[in-house]
Image: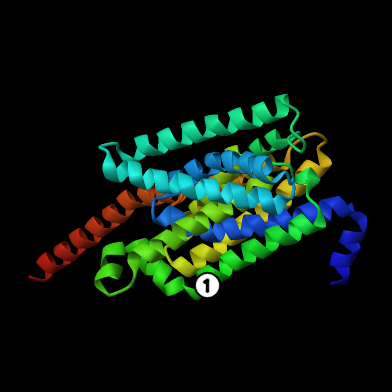
Amino acid sequence: MIRLSVIAAFLPYNTLVVAAGVAAVGCAAGVIGTFGVLRKRALVGDAAAHATLVGVASALLLTGQRDLAVLLVGGLTSAMVAIVLLVLIRKFTRTRDDAAIAIVLSVSFGLGITLISGMVSRGIPGSGGLERFLLGHTASLTAHDAILLGAVSATSVLCIVVGLKEATMVAFDRDFAAAAGWPAATIDFVLIALVAVMVVVGLPAAGAVLVTALVVIPPAVARQWTERIVPMLVIAGTVGLVSSLLGVAISSVAVQIPTGPVVVLVATSFLIFSVFLAPCRGIVWRARATSLLPSACCEEKDAETTARVVTEQKL
């Protein structure tokens, strides 16, 4: 505690606020994103992220308030609408999943950019700076905003902790969960909704363009290290937390470098490290195992030959 207080004394107040808010989002995004990755819904989160710009612009246009909570509620609404559109397109047309995601992503993103640009050009009060939601705007986070992000992140993680058994069952085998009597469709929808929530909450940290990385890269790192769900959740949350803290620290030292892209790059470095050096799944580990396999086979054959010779000599 004394060391933490000493460190905090030398850090600017704004940096501490940003670090607290972004770290909470990064940790929760890693945990929630694990189920999105296991359910193969990563691109659904990307479509929801790009659709948030429509909700952010519409919330400001309808309410006239620039409060972060109001903007995030608008972003969450448009993200859920995008997910519903994905379901409808897939159900009532012959469009494949990847094409439906591409359609919703591109159309919603184009509409969001059009709304924001139009509001700025017409001088609508509060519209200036909305384009920062593209890459995040952590520099403008206040203590109230950080508390809001932390509260939403903690609530989302708590939902996963309470329903871990049900969420795990649906994530790995939805049909079996439905056959066992669980409301698989409802649980699946809740998981998708939590991914959408984390995408929206991550807007101030990484922006609409990069926020999907917060819910995809940490689980991908964790998947390299373990096959069990609880360790995977812990590793993903830790990677998201550490990446966020390092990203904030680096961006605070390097002038005029946005925090969101730095956080994503730090998380990517963890992924590269895991791809090469993770036990059993890493490239180096597998290459070493492959190189040792022929020698092991030769030793086995030599042992068999020696045993056969000894047996023949005894006979």
The image quarter in which residue 241 lies: bottom right
Measured along the vertical axis of the image, is residue 104 above or below residue 35? above
Tell me which residue sits at (54%, 50%) in the image. Answer: 77
Tell me which residue sits at (32%, 55%) in the image. Answer: 296
Q: Secondary structure at mark 1?
A: helix
Tell me which residue sits at (45%, 56%) in the image. Answer: 192
Residue 184, image x and y in percent? 34, 66
| Nearer to me, 153 or 61 | 61
- How many dots with numbers? 1
Measured along the vertical axis of the image, is residue 25 above or below residue 204? below
Going by the numbered disc 1, the residue's amino acid type is: Val
Measured along the vertical axis of the image, is residue 90 above or below residue 233? above
Q: Which residue is mark 1?
A: 161
Quarter holding the C terminus is: bottom left
| Nearer to me, 64 or 259 | 64
Tell me which residue sits at (39%, 55%) in the image. Answer: 39
Q: Tell whether 256 sits left or right of 86.
A: right
